[in-house]
Image (cartoon, rainbow, N blue to C red):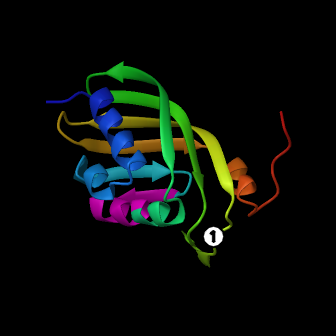
Amino acid sequence: MADAAELGGRWFQALTSGDVEAAVSLLSDDVDFGSPAGANKGSAEVRQFLQGYQLGFPDARFAVSAVYGSGQTAALEGTYSGTNTGPLTSPSGEIPATGKYASVPFVTVLETDGERITAHRAYWDQLAFMGQLGLMPLPPSA
C-alpha cells in the first residue's frame, strides 16, 4: 500500500524519464484525469495524451519542489520544462514543432485507492505555456 505522495513522486519520476508505460501503470483503469489541455477518462485515453506530450517534448522535466498531504490525497507543486521539438496534437489538428523552450509552474492534485492513482487534476498557466512556444501572444507580466 502506497500513499498518494509516494505515488505522485513515482508518477513524476516516470514522466521525467520518458517512461509512459511506467506512468500509466500507476493509474487505475478508470482514472479521472484533468488538465488545462482537457479531460481524459481511463488509462487508455491518458496513455494517448502522455504519448502526445512525450512526442512533442522528448526532453520534458518535472521538477517537484513541494508535496502536501498524506494518505489518499496529495498535491505536488513544481515546474514543468521542455523544448518543443516534435509535433503537438490539438483539437484543430497537428501543430508543427516550434523548437522553443517552455517552463511553467504547475500543481497536481492526486487521489488514490492506496495502490493506484484514481484521480489526477493538474493546473498550469496554459496561456503562458502557449505564449512561450510562440503559438499566441505572451500575457502581460504581473
Mark 1 neighbour class, 10 Å CA radius: few under 14, some 14 to 19, many 20 or more: some
Which residue corresponds to mark 1? 97
Residue for point 74% across, 64% down: 135
Q: Nearer the viewer, residue 17 or 106?
A: 17
Residue for point 18% across, 33% down: 114
Quadrant in the picture for the C terminus: top right
Q: Position of residue 94 (x, y in %)?
A: 58, 77
Q: Position of residue 127 (x, y in %)?
A: 71, 51
Q: Say whether residue 39 is magenta.
A: yes
Point out the residue furthest to the left here.
1
Task: From this view, report whether residue 123 is shown above or below residue 30.
Answer: above
Task: From this view, report whether residue 130 is shown above or below residue 124.
Answer: below
Q: Is residue 125 visible?
A: no
Which SS class for mark 1? loop
Majority secondary structure of magenta residues: helix
Quarter of the rendering containing residue 7 = top left
Q: Say whether residue 107 is magenta.
A: no
Q: Nearer the viewer, residue 57 or 49?
A: 57
First to last magenta residue range: 38-50
Quarter of the rendering containing residue 85 = bottom right
Q: Is residue 44 left or right of residue 37?
A: left
Point out the residue furthest to the bottom here.
93
Task: From this view, report whether residue 108 is shown above or below residue 56.
Answer: above
Amino acid type at mark 1: Ala
Residue for point 35% across, 50% down: 32
Residue for point 84% across, 38% down: 141
